[in-house]
């Protein structure tokens, strides 16, 4: 199995999607359709939601196919 993943980023977080882990439970789609839309390319559009809601939705992913990390604050 490969460790292939795609990344998506906004100013607050970087989201990782590992398609080989995806169970297609659709929790992400039901949880935040504006951000996670399988009919759109790219299917994840972070600008369509608030970071807090995106994190909450990712935390409901049962397979771990979706994960995130907070971005480092910008240096002044």
Image: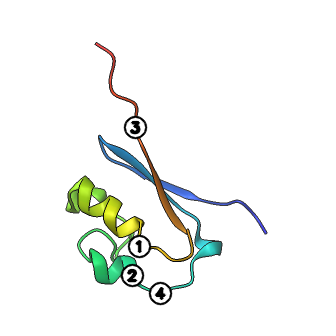
Which residue is at 59% across, 65% downward? Answer: 18
Residue 49, horizontal then vertical, whole percent:
21, 61
Secondary structure type for disc 3? loop
Secondary structure of the residue carrying numbered label 4: loop
Element assignment for label 2: helix
Task: Tell me if label 3 and label 2 are in contact, CB under 8 Å.
Answer: no
Numbered circle sitting on residue 73:
none
Q: Quadrant of the C terminus?
A: top left
State left or right for residue 30 relative to residue 26.
left
Find disc 1 in the rendering and name its residue.
60
Gap between marks 3 and 1 measured at Cα: 20 Å
Q: Is residue 66 left or right of residue 5?
A: left
Mark 3 neighbour density, 10 Å: few (under 14) some (14–19) many (20 or more): few
CA distance separating discs 2 and 1: 7 Å
Residue 3 appears left or right of 47: right
Residue beneath disc 4: 25
Disc 2 packing (10 Å; few <14; some 14–19; many ≥20):
some
Work out which residue is located at the far top of the displayed protein and give it: 76
Task: Give whichever of discs 4 and 3 has the lower sequence position.
Answer: 4
Instruction: Name the residue that disc number 3 marks.
Output: 71
In the rendered structure, are the residues bearing label 2 and label 4 in contact, judged by CB atoms less than 8 Å apart? yes
Marks 4/1: CA distance?
Answer: 10 Å
Mark 3 / mark 2, whichever is N-terminal: 2
Q: CA distance from mark 2 to mark 4?
A: 5 Å
Q: Earlier in the sequence, mark 3 or mark 1?
A: 1
Q: Position of residue 12 (x, y in %)?
A: 31, 42
Sequence order check, earlier mark of 4 and 1 = 4
């Amino acid at each position: 199995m490969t460790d292939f993943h795609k990344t998506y980023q906004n100013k607050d977080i970087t989201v990782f999607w590992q398609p080989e882990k995806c169970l297609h439970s659709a929790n992400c789609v039901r949880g935040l359709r504006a951000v996670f839309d399988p009919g759109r390319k790219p299917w994840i559009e972070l600008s369509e939601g608030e970071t807090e809601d995106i994190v909450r939705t990712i935390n409901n992913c049962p397979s771990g196919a979706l994960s995130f990390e907070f971005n480092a604050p910008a240096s002044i």
